[in-house]
């Protein structure tokens, strides 16, 4: 419940708040390329159910004055029962972009914080025990598992 409340209170913005150049760099950092007017990862789904890459949220998650961006893509063929995957990228000093986390499932930023203030990220999908990733100053790594805020074992 806390994670849901936190996620709902976060400032969210549309891709239009990023310049076209920043959008392109964010997608590239997430491993996407543009083809036929769509941003695509290495997912090869060509069905009508495929949802191309989209910027889902833009926010300054760590308070450094630079945006972090959640990019999502949908495909049951590529992402199984979850049907979706996301990438979290961050704009760094000098204008470069860096991939922070990529996972299958739905991302929910939590109130817990890793070393430079980045929020913990719960990755949910089918099932009842989800990994929570914490930034360790080098990368996001699984810190623990939970379901509805309670510890669990996968």
Image (cartoon, rainbow, N blue to C red):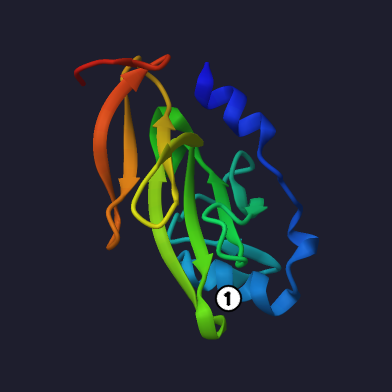
- Relative depth, front residue between 30 and 89: 89
Residue positioned most to the left: 153
Tell me if 17 is positioned left or right of 90 in this view: right
- Relative depth, front residue between 24 and 81: 24
Q: Residue at x 60, y 71 (%)?
A: 34
Which element is circle 1 on?
helix
Q: Residue at x 27, y 63 (%)?
A: 138
Tell me if 33 is positioned left or right of 99 in this view: right
Tell me if 130 is positioned left or right of 49 in this view: left
Return the residue at label 1: 25
Q: Residue at x 40, y 17 (%)?
A: 149
The quadrant in which the C terminus is found is: top left
Residue 133: x %, y % from top left = 33, 41
Q: Residue at x 44, y 52 (%)?
A: 117
Q: Is residue 146 visible?
A: yes
Residue 64: x %, y % from top left = 55, 64
Residue 122: x %, y % from top left = 41, 33
Residue positioned most to the right: 16
Crowding at mark 1 (Cα within 10 Å: few <14, some 14-19, many 20+): some
Residue 45: x %, y % from top left = 50, 50
Q: Is residue 33 visible?
A: no
């Amino acid at each position: 419940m806390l994670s849901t409340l936190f996620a709902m209170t976060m400032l969210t913005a549309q891709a239009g708040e990023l310049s076209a150049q920043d959008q392109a760099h964010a997608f590239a950092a997430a491993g996407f390329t543009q083809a036929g007017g769509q941003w695509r990862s290495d997912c090869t789904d060509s069905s009508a159910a495929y949802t191309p890459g989209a910027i889902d949220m833009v926010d300054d998650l760590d308070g450094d004055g630079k945006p972090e961006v959640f990019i999502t893509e949908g495909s049951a063929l590529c992402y199984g029962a979850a049907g979706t995957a996301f990438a979290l990228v961050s704009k760094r000093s000098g204008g470069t972009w860096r991939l922070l986390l990529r996972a299958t499932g739905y991302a929910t930023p939590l109130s817990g914080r890793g070393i430079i203030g980045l929020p913990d990220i719960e990755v949910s999908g089918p099932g009842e025990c989800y990994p929570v990733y914490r930034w360790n100053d080098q990368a996001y790594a699984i810190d623990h598992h939970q379901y509805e805020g309670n510890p669990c074992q996968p």
